[in-house]
Amino acid sequence: MRLRIQLLAGTSLMLASIVVGVAAQRGGAPPLPQAAQGGGRGGTRGGNVPTPGVGNPNATFPAQQRPAGDPALIARGNGLYGANCRLCHGADLRGGEQGGPNLLRSAVVFDDQSGELIAPVVLNGRNNPGMPPMPKITLPADDIKAIAEYIHSIVATSQGQGAPPRGAPVQLNVLVGDAKAGEAYFAKTCSSCHSVTGDLAGLGTRLANPTQLQNAWLGGNAGGGGRGGGRGGGAANPVTVTVTPPNGPKVEGVRERLDDFMVVLTLADGSQRSFRRDGDVPRVEVHDPAEAHRKLLPGYTDKDIHDVTAYLVNVK
Amino acid sequence: MTIRKFIFVCALLVVPALPAMIGAQAQAGLDPASLLKPLSATWPTYSGDYTGRRFSALTQANRNTVKNLSLAWFSRVTAGQPAAGRGGAAANLIVGGEGSGEFGAGGGVTVKGSMLMVDDHLYVTSPDNVWMLDARDGHELWHYYWKTKGSTHIANRGVGIWHNYLYFETPDDYLVSLDARTGKERWHVEISDFNQQYFSTMAPIVVGDHLLVGTGNDIDSPGFLQSFDPDTGKLQWKFYTVPMNPGDPGLDTWPNLEAARHGGGQVWVPGSYDPDTKLYIFGTGNPTPGYTGQGRPGDNLFTCSLIAVNVETGKMAWYFQTSVHDTHDWDSAQTPVLIDAMINGRARKLVSTAARNGYFYTLDRVTGEHLVTSKYGTTTNWSTGLRPNGVVEPDPGKAATIPGSLVSPVEGGVTNWPPPAYSPDTGLFYVQEHNGFNMLYLTDPDPRGSMGLGGKQVSQLGSGGNFLTAIDPKTGKVAWRHTYTGGGGGGLLATAGGVVFSGDGSGNFVAYDASNGKPLWHSRIGNISNAPQTYLIDGHQQVLAAVGDTVYAFVMN
């Protein structure tokens, strides 16, 4: 909803979060016995069982602020959940094959402290309009409290901005493109500046992860030697400007600042110069190495992108 | 000019019809009826007046004279309580709150809201903090600090004022009322459930004896707008933006009631108000889960919609969905703008919005009849076309996909909360336009969908240009664009002096010619973090903007 700060802009971070999806052990909590495998609706996350935890010590919502529960009680609750709740609510608590609701976003769970709101639902059942009715489940108060502790321990591992707890790694196939078509597209659009035996040689080896490779070539960062032009120029390939004052020679240098009122550049000798700008005076030409890649962005179809990636991933 | 006169006449007609609700002790201070007047010498509500135009009638700083605008003062505010042993502001610090003080306000202040100016006093806010400054020189008169229980401290959009009382929302979901002269707390009431992870940022909007209050949430909870009694803090009505019960309108646009009840549609930016129809018109947030729509097939009403509710009853009069089945976190909370114009030879009462998704819409604000849809985001690419009713059809291929989809705009949208402006003199709607591309990957292909804003990864690829953009609301056509060398940001102010004020994102606070976008004046104070404002002090026009924790007042001498 609100204007968000890009937390995972870097492709390496992105790679890590896709591939390493295993819930981290937090707060020194010992590994706990896991519920039986299976149960999640659909194939892709079937065996996904979150690891109980104590939440993020820096978090500021109550679910994440909750102090660590008694590990023995949580472990007992885990088993009881598996036997009594999992079929409907899912091994990962996000709803199960019998149509029970997601407990990770349940208002009852959020408002519950230690089973006092969950117990009446367990004991009396529940009729949610448009959903299968929840049957009454007769359980001792201690067992319900243990289940509640287990549920809270999982909710506490939810991630920021409402994202659920990290699940098990998911195999995601990014390589859906047609390498032949990608080769043709490359020849037509890219080969005037790039070559798979030149600057891009070994690309598929250097960037073995296809997502990382795809992001790199789209951003203009796929060339050897760490081209830095993807977001307006890093140290390797900075944006330069040529300033032509009305009376005087051209001045060239690295762009430090350019706005409607001033241009600041660093000259080859390391010194800085600045000029007042008033409309088109003085004339300022910008040379941005990333510009060519940026100009291509509106023209790509997703198929073009996937095809080129399928081609480049084999450039070993 | 004639349009402004027309509105003024309307205001005069409506004032006597307002309910006589005011207790004798509350008679002083700001009369809510004064909010019906066009924006001029003061700034008494979030957008200055109810129209959302952020158009001031002041003309001292005009196309010819604005170059003489000079700094009157600047004032820096400090959040929270002073550390033990430090003197200073403690004498006029008032502390309230339900929290232990364990969770700080997150360090530095960034003013991202409106600073009301009433009776020569400014009310400045950040999450958990309200300051009263003297608008003559910026000195601080008092500081109210709310000790929080926690939650998301992203922003506070400002206070509302009713007679001598102030109202503001806290991140941990309280509505707090202060005495506007002393900063002493009158009462606080809970407005949404902190345990359910709501967090509240909106500036309360006073309409007669109603206090309109919205709240926010990222974790799949229903959105709602509430009206409170400004005298007592008692709830008057609550309007949910998603279906909550069997038979509720819009339920057929969700797979089931469970999905609808977790469908989001948060109300976190103030709307506009039309006194003729008693309709409060506001935008709603994105559906949830935000990026993984596979678990919520359908249009997902009334998320990403313009909604008109009657302020007396809280009942919806009409709606128009500006994004159906959003899967990009592009909420439509942007403040709508009320415009009066001739279309096809007929005087129309219009409402326009430039949505975060890159589309511009104009509707009839009495009936909700659709009139204009146009694409103003230069590189916006997520649609396959328009439905016959003007609704933009999303391209399912531009949702997050496993191999990645190239999407424009980026997550933050073409625009966001920073307010637009409209000048009846130029007939142009001004908005800060941001274009950019992301690769958007689906990382949680579970058919149930993910939760909140999870289940996706994003790679930013580059900008497609940022602009101060002027749109003709009658046609949706862009009249001109002025390139922001930086990103712009903060929001806009238009004036009858023919000037639009904005930050340029390159560290300059700039006055642009409202007719063509040419820069007329600037001051390098840093990137402004809120929308500029203007008012009169001792007969002189001041122009106000904040840069993070510092408020700058410029003056026409």
Image (tube, grey):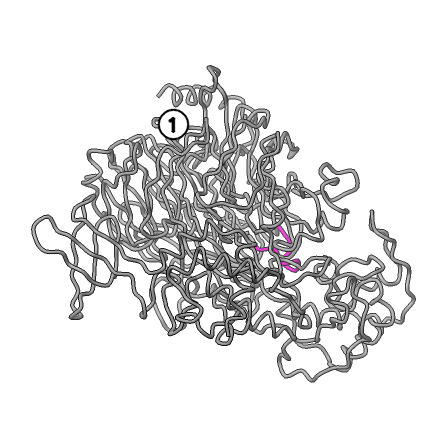
Residue drawn at the location 71% of the way across and 83% of the way down: A31
Say what amino acid the circle numbered 1 marks: Gly
The vertical placement of B119 against A249, above or below, is: above
Which residue in the protein does label 1 denote?
B427
Q: Residues within 10 Å of mark 1 (few under 14, many from 20)?
A: some
Is residue A296 rendered magenta in the image? no
- Can you name the residue that lies furthest to the left here? A247
Q: Position of residue B440 (x, y in %)?
A: 55, 58
Say which quarter of the image contains residue A51: bottom right
| Magenta region, residue range | B192-199
B530 or B220, nearer to the observer: B220
- Tell me what residue is drawn at x 37 percent, y 44 percent: B467
Vertical relation: B361 (above or below) A120: above
Quadrant of the drawing holding the N terminus of chain B: top left
Query: Is B437 situated left or right of A17 in this image?
Result: left
Q: Residue B480's x, y, as percent?
A: 35, 35
Q: Chain of mark 1?
A: B
Quadrant of the frame with the C terminus of chain B: top left
**Which residue is nearer to you in this view: B409 or B3?**
B409
Camera-side residue of B435 and B397: B397
